[in-house]
Image: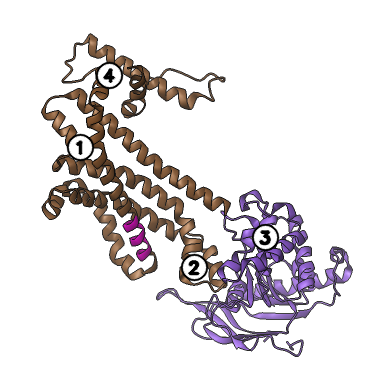
Amino acid sequence: MTAEYSAVPRIAIAPARPAGKPALTGPRLSQARPVILPLMTAAVVLLVWQIVVAVLRIPAVILPPPAEIGYELWRVLPVLLHHAVPTTLDSLMAFFSASALGVGVAIVITYSPFLRDMLYPNLVLFQLIPKVALAPLFVVWLGIGSQSRVAFATFVSFFPVVISAAVGFANVECSALRLCRSLTASEWQCFTIVRFPFALPAIFSGMKIAMTMAVIGVIIGEFISAQAGLGFYILYASSRMETAVIFAALFVLCVIGVALFGAVALAEELVRRSYGRR
Amino acid sequence: MPVVGRERYVEVAEVSKVYRAGTAEAIEAVSSVSFTVPRGQFVAVLGPSGCGKSTLLMMLGGLESVTAGHIAVGGEPMTVPRTSIGIMFQDPTLLPWKSALDNVLFPIRVLKRPLNTYRDGARELLERVGLDGFMHKKPHELSGGMRQRVAICRTLVYDPELLLMDEPFSALDAITRDEMNELLLDLWQQYTKTALFVTHSIREAVFLADRVLVMTRRPATIVEDLTIPFARPRPMAIGESREFNAICGHLRERVGESRSRANGHRAEPNRARPGPAA
C-alpha cells in the first residue's frame, strides 16, 4: 500500500498542483530542492485531497480518495497492463512513422524551394485545424482496426516534427555550408556532415512533442473505436461508474507517457554524446 | 600597375560583380579588377570594410560567380570550388561536436581521402601552432585565437596550393592577432603556398605580404599595387622600423584618398567601368 501511495502523486497529480506550496528556501536545502519540493507538493496535495473527500463526504463516484485509487490500481493492475500493451505499441508505431515522415518532408522542403512554397504554408495552415475533429474520418477511411488509430496518431504527431526539422535544417550556420562547398562536398555530404547534425536538437525537440502527441492521438482513437487499449478501458470504466478505476488507468497512462518521453529524451542524450565524442 | 613575376598563377582579368536583387537597383560590388599573382607570392588585398574585397576573394575561390571578366587559377578558368584551393573565412567555422583534431581532419573526410595517412600530419600541424595539449578539446573549450589556429591547420591539412584568407583574424584582439600573424608567416614560410589575404588592417597587410593591393570602397577597384621590400623571415620588430611605418603611412594615404573619391561616386549599374589602376 505504501509503495503505490508514494508512487501515485508524482505523475498523476502533477498538473493539478496548487499555487500554495510549502516554502523551501533554506540554503542547505537548495541542492535537494528540485527533487524534494515537487514530491512534497504532490504529497501535500494528495493528503489534502484525502482529507477534503472525507470531510466533505464527496461520493467516491465523483472523486475517489487517493487511497482508494491506490487500492484499485493494485487490484486491476494486470488488466490495466494488458490494455497498456496495444496503447503503447500503437503510440510507438505512430511516433516512428511520424518522425520518419516528418523529417522526410522537412528534407524535401529544405531542398526544393518549389515544393517548399507549395507545401509549407499549407502545412502551417493545417496546424490550425483542430485535428481531433478529424478522428472519425480515419475510422471511416481505415476501419476500426489499429491501423486507423496509428494513422490518426501519426497525423496528429507529424506536424511538430516537420516544422521543427524544417526550421532546424534552415537555421544551419551558412558559414559551415560554405566551408563544405569550398571543399567540393556533394549536396549529400553537406547534408550528412553538417546540416543534419546541426539540425538534430531541433529535430529532437519536435520528436519529443510528437511522442506526447502520439499517445494523445492513440487514446482519442481508442475512445472512438477499439476493443482494447487504455483509452477503451477508461471509457469502459466510466460506463460502469468506476471512477477509481479511471484514475488508476490514468496513472498507468501517465507512467507510459513519461516512459516514452523519457526514452526519446534519452535517445537525444545518447545521440548528443556520440556526436560529442566523435 | 605592372605585373611582378613571370608566371601568372592567379589571373584576374577585368572582373566585375553586380548584385541584382529582383527589380531593385543593381549594386556593383566589384568593378573591373585586374591583377595577376605568380606562384609562391603572398598578396594582401587591403581596403575598407565592405568594399567588395571579400566578394573578390569568394569569386577567386569559386564560391561566387563573376558577372563580367574572367578568373583563372593555374591556367584553368575558375567556375566551381577546387580542392587545390584552401579558404579561410572570417570566423573559424569549426563543427562544435568535433574535437580540434577531428575538425582539422574534416576536409580529409569530405574529400574521402584515407584518414590514417593524414592523421599524423594533422597532429604535427596542431603541434606546430602550439595546440599539443588541446587536440581532443571541443571548440567551446578553446579560446578565439586557438579556434582560428585550428582553422589554419584545417586549411593546410589537405595541402592546397593556393590559400585564400578572408580577414581571418579580424575578430581577434590585437595581441592575439599579432601572434596569429607571426604564426601564419611562420607556417607560410614552411609550406610556401601562394596566398591571398584580405584585410582592412594596413599594418597586418604590410607585415604579412610581398605585395599589397589597395582597393577602393564600392564599387571596388584596385588603385595601388605596392611591393613590400622586407626580406623574410620577418621578425615582429620590423613593425617599429621607420621604413615599415613610411610604407604604412603611404598606404593609409591611398586608402584615405580612395575613400573620399568613392564618396562622390555612385554605383553605375549594368556597365563595367574601366579600372583606373588596372
Q: Tell me which corner region of the image, top left, top right, bottom left or bottom right, holds residue B213.
A: bottom right
Disc 1 versus disc 3: distance between alpha carbons? 56 Å
Mark 3: amino acid:
Val
Disc 4 versus disc 1: distance between alpha carbons? 21 Å
**Does residue B167 appear in this view?**
no
**Does residue A218 appear in this view?**
yes
Instruction: Tell me which residue sits at (49%, 66%) in the image.
Output: A190
Q: Which residue carries the number 2 mark?
A: A189
- Of the two numbered discs 3 and 2 in the rendering, the one whose residue sits closer to the viewer: 2
Label 1: element kind = helix
Q: Which residue carries the number 3 mark?
A: B150
Mark 2: amino acid:
Gln
Write down the region rendered in magenta: A100-109
**Residue A217 placement (x, y as % from top left):** 24, 44
> Which chain has been coloured purple in this picture?
B
**Residue B58 counted in the magenta span:** no
Instruction: Tell me which residue sits at (57%, 83%) in the image.
Output: B78
Disc 1 versus disc 2: distance between alpha carbons? 45 Å
Q: Colour of chain A?
A: brown
